[in-house]
Amino acid sequence: MRGKTPVIAMVAAGVLGAAAGGWPVLTAGRGGGSGPSMRTQLATVLGDQRWATPKPGSWTMPQPSADGLPPVITDIDTQDRVVFLTIDDGYTYDSEFVNLVRKEKVPIMTFLTSTYIKGQGQYFWAMRNAGSAMENHTVSHPNMATLGPEAQKKEICDSSDAIAKQYGRRPEIFRPPFGSYNKTTLQVARECGIKSVLIWSAEFYNGTSGPGVGYNGFARRDGAKGFKPGDIILMHYRKGLAGELQMILGWIRQAGFRPAAVQNYLPRSLGGNAPDKPGPA
């Protein structure tokens, strides 16, 4: 693994991994200390997050596709001044990021490329227990539209199998690498248990340069500027992510928005947490 994972996150990951039949228990290193007890630290790390749900009538719930295939969602139609932070891949990470997500209580949705579980599985245990859902981003990050049906199915189904085995829940939301997909992708995704495909409306090029926006730039897919209610924002797991999260949180708050949990704006039939038929306001 690159970087240095915090001891607390590593221990928590090991404990929960063992409970799920995955990663072995890790023990704290030797030596004393005057800080909080390990029990107290673990209680903090393992605390379950509950994100705010939208008020009835404040958003238009995405609907299933008429053809029965997973619908492709690029943003959420909402009156709330909220945006949704989603982070892809997992090939490298910032060791301070998990602590910051927990401290700031930031809802995150992770689209995990499952090949990285082998090297960084414990890091993503810590992310899961900081409140991030673990969803499907294929096994090896190919351009899906260039693959045949069997290869596409293997990428999606095998990734869901690996994530379910390690993190205790089978993904129901899929994000195709590069945003590239075709009808075959949607067909095999359904066969693999995927209920919706989540793309993005804007990208924060954290830790890299974006076309026309420079290093750590922000760009909307529609070419407009700033945030819009219901934006789904793409980021990537890269070194320096903690500082970059602080950066975009500052922009979001300065613009009068807040991060929200996208799964709370999706119905259960599409892989979210919201009832398929909301109650009265």
Image (cartoon, rainbow, N blue to C red):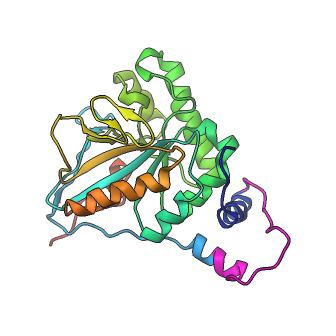
Pick whichever, 1 or 264, lies toward us.
Answer: 1
**The residue stretch that appears in magenta:** 21-42
For this view, does 152 lie left or right of residue 256? Answer: right
Q: How many numbered dots are placed on residues in this image?
A: 0
For this view, does 129 lie left or right of residue 256? Answer: right
Tell me what residue is drawn at x 82 percent, y 67 percent: 29
Pick whichever, 204 or 177, lies toward us.
Answer: 204
Pick whichever, 263 or 253, lies toward us.
Answer: 253
Tell me what residue is drawn at x 69 percent, y 44 percent: 1
Tell me what residue is drawn at x 72 percent, y 60 percent: 14
Residue that protrudes farthest toward the right in the picture: 30
Which of the 4 image quarters holds residue 91? top right
For residue 44, above or below residue 150? below
Task: Determine if residue 88 is in view.
Answer: yes
Residue 18 image point, x, y percent: 74, 60
Tell me what residue is drawn at x 19 percent, y 48 percent: 226
For residue 68, above or below residue 276? above
Residue 184 image point, x, y percent: 39, 22
Residue 93 image point, x, y percent: 57, 47
For residue 217, above or below residue 99? above
Report if residue 152 lies within the magenta region.
no
Task: Determine if residue 266 is in view.
Answer: no
Residue that protrudes farthest toward the front in the picture: 214
For this view, does 21 lie left or right of residue 262? Answer: right
Report if residue 34 lies within the magenta region.
yes
Quadrant including the C terminus: bottom left
Which of the 4 image quarters holds residue 278? bottom left
Dominant secondary structure of the magenta stretch? Answer: loop
Residue 207 image point, x, y percent: 45, 41
